[in-house]
């Protein structure tokens, strides 16, 4: 048995962990995966060489670099029987906040909230594919991943079009208080998801470690929308909301591309 350690610089939340798990699903010489999200490290226990593993990880464009490969005597690995239940929990949280943010974003005329709702939907896709596709056939996994990825890109492009329309139009200011309040609750929801999924990996020292929580893209986006809401009120302009919305739409498209790469 061999143990290979990879540094994955863009792996900063559990949704990327699930993307990696799905990408590596089906490589028969992999015996176990051990994720250390706070330190952006992945340890792969495997037989044979690492070429196929490296190629798959590099295909996700998450900044993968192999650190070391060594022999190991470890043959027993702890199974997490609660993983499916936890995936259902974070799927429910993310999808619920997709609905909440999309609804309040439309009502309050905030593109920041609408864009963040699509980011929540993107995470929902990842957890949903993890539940319904992993362990099934490779063909089924590819079809689900491709459908989710293209749908996500379509929504993000429609969001960009709306940003442009509002930028050149004469729209009412978004409701800054709704932006802030909803984003604070979304921030709490993301923190809960991170806590639950890190807890499931039995890394007790990392449960609520700030270095983990505040390097998460999801949390940074929430803070961005809160900041945009404050600037909307301070500057009496919708531009901060449109700017943060555009940034998040770009991140959503990047996430969609990674989902599409699962099936490649």
Image (cartoon, grey):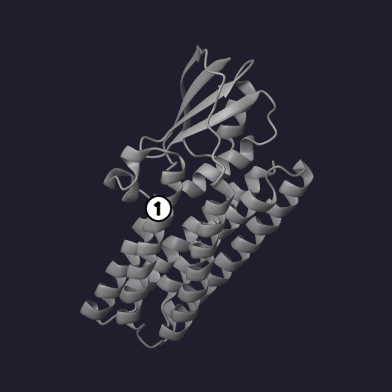
Please state which of residues 76 and 100 is positioned toward the viewer in this rendering: 76
Residue at figure coordinates x 42%, y 61% from the top left = 247
Residue 118 in the image, given as x and y percentages of width and height: 52, 66
Residue 170, located in which quarter of the rendered image? bottom left
Residue 183 in the image, given as x and y percentages of width and height: 36, 70
Please state which of residues 55 and 18 is positioned toward the viewer in this rendering: 18
Can residue 135 be seen here? The reply is: yes
Residue at figure coordinates x 70%, y 58% from the top left = 147
Residue 219 in the image, given as x and y percentages of width and height: 36, 57
Viewed as shown, does residue 85 lie left or right of 101? right
- Above or below, 178 against 28 in this view is below
Residue at figure coordinates x 34%, y 56% from the top left = 220
User: Circle 1 — which element?
Assistant: helix
Residue 32 in the image, given as x and y percentages of width and height: 57, 28
Residue 50, located in which quarter of the rendered image? top right
Viewed as shown, does residue 219 lie left or right of 79? left
- Above or below, 203 against 67 in this view is below
Viewed as shown, does residue 239 lie left or right of 69? left
Please state which of residues 205 and 227 is positioned toward the viewer in this rendering: 205
Residue at figure coordinates x 57%, y 57% from the top left = 88
Direction front: furthest residue: 81
* Residue on which the image places disc 1: 217
Question: Callout 1 environment at 10 Å: few (<14), some (14 to 19), or many (20+)?
Answer: some
If the image is split into quadrants, where does the N terminus sit? top right
């Amino acid at each position: 048995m061999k143990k290979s350690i990879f540094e994955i610089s863009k792996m900063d939340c559990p949704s990327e962990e699930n993307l990696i798990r799905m990408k590596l699903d089906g490589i028969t010489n992999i015996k176990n995966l051990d994720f250390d999200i706070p330190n952006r490290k992945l340890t792969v226990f495997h037989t044979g060489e690492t070429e196929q593993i490296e190629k798959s990880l590099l295909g996700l464009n998450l900044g993968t670099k192999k650190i070391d490969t060594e022999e190991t005597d470890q043959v027993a690995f702890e199974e997490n029987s609660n993983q499916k239940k936890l995936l259902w929990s974070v799927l429910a949280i993310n999808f619920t906040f997709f609905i909440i943010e999309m609804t309040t974003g439309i009502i309050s005329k905030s593109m920041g909230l609408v864009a963040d709702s699509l980011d929540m939907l993107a995470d929902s896709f990842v957890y949903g594919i993890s539940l319904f596709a992993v362990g099934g056939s490779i063909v089924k996994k590819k079809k689900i991943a491709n459908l989710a990825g293209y749908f996500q890109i379509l929504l993000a492009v429609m969001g960009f079009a709306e940003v442009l329309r509002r930028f050149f139009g004469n729209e009412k200011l978004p409701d800054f208080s709704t932006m802030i309040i909803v984003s604070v609750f979304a921030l709490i929801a993301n923190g809960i998801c991170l806590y639950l999924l890190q807890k499931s990996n039995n890394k007790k020292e990392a449960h609520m470690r700030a270095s983990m929580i505040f390097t998460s893209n999801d949390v940074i986006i929430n803070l961005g929308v809160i900041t945009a809401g404050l600037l909307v009120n301070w500057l009496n302009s919708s531009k901060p909301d449109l700017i943060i919305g555009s940034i998040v739409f770009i991140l959503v498209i990047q996430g969609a591309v990674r989902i599409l790469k699962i099936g490649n």
